[in-house]
Amino acid sequence: MQAVIAEVYAPSVFMIALTVWLLRWEAGRNSLPRAACLLLAAFALGLSLGTHLSNLGFGPAFALYVLLVDWRVLKRPAVLGGALALFLLGCLQFLWLPYKSSTLNDAFVLRNAPRTLESIYRYTLGAFPQFKFALPLQAIPDRMVLCLELLRQNFGVVGVVLGVYGMWEMLFRDTDKFYLFITMYLVHVFFLIQYRVFDLDVFFIPAHFVYAIFIGYGVYQLVEYVRVLLNVVDFGSLGCLESRRQSSDQTSEVLGSWRGAVNVGLAVLLCLPIAGEVQANYEKNDHSHETAINDFYENAFEILPEGSVLLGRGGVFGYDMFYWRLVYNARPDVLMSHLTNPRPSPEDVKGREIYTTMRLDSPQAGRGPWGLPPDLVESEAWHIPVLVRQCDGPIPGGGGRDLILYRVSAEPPELVVRLALSGAEGEVEPEYQIGQQLGGLELVDYDLDGEEVSRGAHLHLSFCWRVLRPEQALIATMLGDEPLEAHPLGLGNLPRYIREFRPPQDALVVEDYLLVVPSQTPLGLQTLKVGLQEPLRPTQEGQSKGEVLEIGEILVTQ
């Protein structure tokens, strides 16, 4: 799973694999000189620390291996000095930290901004001291059981047994390699057993990589035993053939075909477990259909007014938004003050239209080291949803938090109008008359700005509702079988609007917003649907609660 998400653990394992491959100390006479292998491996190890600092724990294992293969390297100070110099050259990447420390936008990280040698240490090797060796002795047995369970989950019982067998074979056949890999494994596991983090499983990935080497060695030796048995069969066949006085060319051809067939069979047999794992886990780890972040921000940056302000989550949790500015340089005219300053002030946004991807009036907005200042906007400001894109996942199951772009305004939204029959100001002149009931609501009419939309673009919708009886339900919209979003009546602003303005009971509730069409929506004519969903009782996937109205057709284009 880590190979298909933007995380550090897969690149870290790649760098460790590269270091091990370069450390072909005993094989140097057949390819690169031994000194060159050691120098390149030292450089790769230094570079690997940029992917994960825990790779430094493999250093003692590499040093032990070099000494076991050829302890006389201690008499070659030029080689040792060169290896140390190249390792430090790889570590020079950490000079980027003080160089870029002025651009930090994470309030939590700024507490230990890497500007001095002491703060660089706290930022790197000294980070998270509360997690290191933080467990009491009585908790260690349970952690060891957890370690074994993680092995079973990743390799299965057969894989665990093959790994133990591989260790045994390596101990007697390639003793130097055994001490290299067993030291790498034990040092890593020893550190992690007492490391108190909530995502411990991902930290075990390098240890799993080492264990996979043991498994591979065990499989290799089993294959070699099969080859020996086949050679015995070959000699027997050879004797029969000679007794029948056949030519040596015919004998070689028969034996070559037999060995080739066996090799192909062994290759297929070894690939079957891998193919089974891929088949069993492909769907769970296939994220190619998850385009919500991309769809949402592409539309958000398109519709933001010139010179406006865009706010959202800060620090590392805001990088879904920051990515578009830092990588694509999207809309440089739009001010993202919390990108460079984790605690922006009201003066920073004064005189500009303000948009945000989170409600700044919620308790969560200012909570934690990544929260925004509570006084950044007026406490009485309205948060009016402008653009909505549901996170990937079916509506019935909740689908995670919706992506919503709010306009922050001192003026309330045009949320409630009087009945058109009253002739009062604010009459509704809809494009599509519906007049059908959904639970305690009646969909009077709706407006749709255009009947054609591209994948990943947005629709402009306006619904007009009459409340027949109060009930808690979410209004869900769908395009064909693709869920689009679900929201409370009035897009979250109706309770406050009623408290402050006390509209008449015969008034209609108007919802006007932009709705992002997912990039994976099927092409062609799709039916636009609206229905109700209980927020606390999500229905099963593929089912819907109550009646669903088909209110029109939309042509989805590429």
Image (spheres, helix red, strand yellow):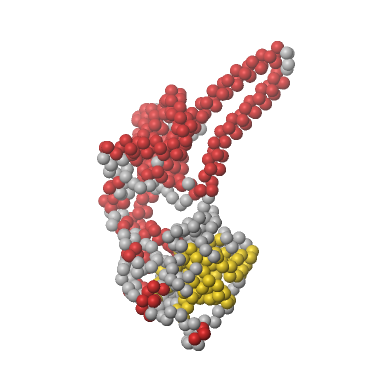
**Residue 324 percent coordinates (x, y):** 46, 63
Q: Residue at x 41, y 39 (%)?
A: 150
Numbered label tally: 0
* Vertical comparison of 553 with 125: above or below: below
* Of residues 51 and 1, the one drawn nearer to the viewer in this rendering: 1
Residue 383 visible from this viewpoint: yes
- Residue 235 horizontal side relative to residue 158, left or right: right
Q: Is residue 551 left or right of residue 169?
A: right
Q: Report the front residue among 439 and 411.
A: 439
Q: Position of residue 114 (x, y in %)?
A: 31, 54
Q: Quadrant of the C terminus?
A: bottom right
Residue 329, image x and y in percent? Answer: 47, 65
Left or right, 263 with reference to 39: right
- Outermost residue on the top side: it is 243
Residue depicted at x 41% and y 47%:
51
Q: At x 43% / y 29%, what residue is drawn?
A: 164
Which of the two residues, 84 or 484, is positioned nearer the viewer here? 484
Against 303, is 425 above or below? below
Instruction: Identify the residue shown where x is 56% and y is 68%.
Output: 549
Q: Position of residue 230 (x, y in %)?
A: 60, 21
Place residue 37 in its image quadrant.
top left
Q: Quadrant of residue 434?
A: bottom right
In the orientation shown, which residue stands out farthest toward the front? 469
Residue 105 visible, this angle = no
